[in-house]
Amino acid sequence: MYRYLPIKDIYAREILDSRGNPTIETEVLTEDGTVGCASVPSGASTGRYEAKELRDKEKQDRYCGRGVELAVNHVNDQIAREVIGMNVYDQLEIDRLLVRIDGTEDKSNLGANAILGVSMAAAKAAAKSLDIPLYRYLGGVHTKRMPVPMMNVLNGGRHADNIIDFQEFMLMPVGACCFKEGLRMCTEVYHMLKALLKGRGYHTGVGDEGGFAPDLPDTDSVCKILLEAIETAGYIPGKEIALALDAAASEIYDRDYGKYVFVGESRGREKKVTRSTEELIDYYAELIEKYPIVSIEDGLEESDFSGWELMTARLGLQTQLVGDDLFVTNSKRLAKGIDCNAANAVLVKVNQIGTLSEAFDTICLAEENGYRSIISHRSGETADTTIADIAVAFGTGQIKTGAPCRSERVEKYNRLMKIEEEIGMEAEYKNPFMDGK
Ligand SMILES: O=C(O)[C@@H](CO)OP(=O)(O)O
Ligand SMILES: [Mg+2]
């Protein structure tokens, strides 16, 4: 027997995310008066195979995005009816029940957004009622590994109104001694990058995740200025700060044409710049040769398992190849990837799958098969910091949560600094590429 604390009430409401679009905030109240509150993020470059975020049919006049009143009603009616009375400490049972009452493969009935809010708020209420931090509640007493940030300092693709074809250019402070130092190093480079861009007449407005969004013509010029920023800030590229990319290749793939189309890079040229799967892999090989790129996410499009297999055979030994749209945090899709040696890491976004327990299952499957896991935010975020705790709880060793200048991203970084302080001397921070994990 263990402690039993029934859920007394569940209440969801519509709030706004960092892009000014509606999203859900959910509260779970327990019999002892504890309230756990969680809000749900939302993507722009969403994967085709993600669990479905339920949005209202009609666009609301007062918002630019479609509302989530339908999903809110599902929480307040159907879900509340079933989940009230359950033991808040039975996370697995709560999550399994949510999946069952939805009844679909992709959670399109109740909505992954409706389900996730309840899953996260229940965990937060449980932790709070025990008066222990969320990372400890989810991860246990031995939780101590801090994640290396993948700090997105330059935005392109669907996250910015510029001409850069790839979506994200990130800094990884692999040579730092602790999370706090890593965060400081990247932030210094971020400020240096701003000065360099400004000095060269580029605008320094930011994209959805807080990275700068200048009109740099191609990936080469982005990598060059990033290296310059790292060096001018006083760090050694590769050794102290490495680079990571999210190509978000599904967004530039032309299905009819069967090739990747680089619209930005084509500007001012007579012929459109396109690359076949093999050519794109060659292009990555060249980039890795020239720049200290340690990780490439969504290097190929989301359905092309055989292309991924090819890319992994070619680049997988020296480079982390991350499946985001490819795996969508779904253990079945990850299992398929493992079977054919596609990728060697999985991006974990809780709203891609809908419950904490399913995200955890995916991380365990990755771990068992020598794949790394990276906890990630979405491009549309809120002040909710649950992913910071999850990254520490599940000991994934890496987190992707944007630039240090938009508060919905900074909240996560600040939460991680607090966690590191709490864990104290026992906190562990290591280069994820040094120990094969
Ligand atoms: O592609 C990604 O990895 C994410 C987060 O950076 O973007 P979005 O939330 O728009 O899918
Ligand atoms: Mg991605």
Image: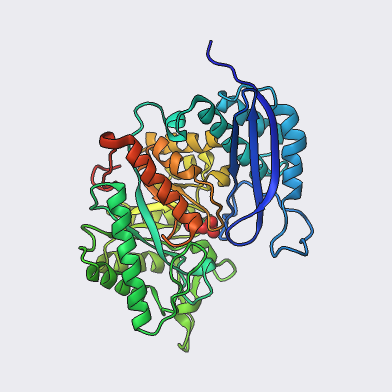
**x and y, in percent, of residue 19 in the image:** 59, 62
**x and y, in percent, of residue 22 in the image:** 67, 55
- Quarter of the view holding residue 337: top left
- Looking at the picture, the colour scheme in use is rainbow
Quarter the C terminus occupies? top left
User: Which is more toward the observer, 178 or 97?
Assistant: 178
User: Which is more toward the observer, 344 or 204?
Assistant: 204
Total count of labels: 0
Residue farthest along the front direction in this orientation:
33
Q: Is there any visible trace of residue 259 in the rendered image?
A: no
User: Which is more toward the observer, 259 or 17?
Assistant: 17
Residue at the image point whose x is 62% and y is 46% from the top: 51
**x and y, in percent, of residue 347 in the image:** 45, 48
Is 428 placed above or below 401 here? above
Residue at the image point whose x is 35% and y is 66% from the top: 190
Residue 7 left/right relative to 70: left
Q: Is there any visible trace of residue 323 in the rendered image?
A: yes
**x and y, in percent, of residue 82 in the image:** 72, 27
Is 363 placed above or below 64 here? above
Is 134 placed above or below 285 here? above
Residue at the image point whose x is 76% and y is 61% from the top: 59
Residue at the image point whose x is 70% and y is 38% from the top: 11
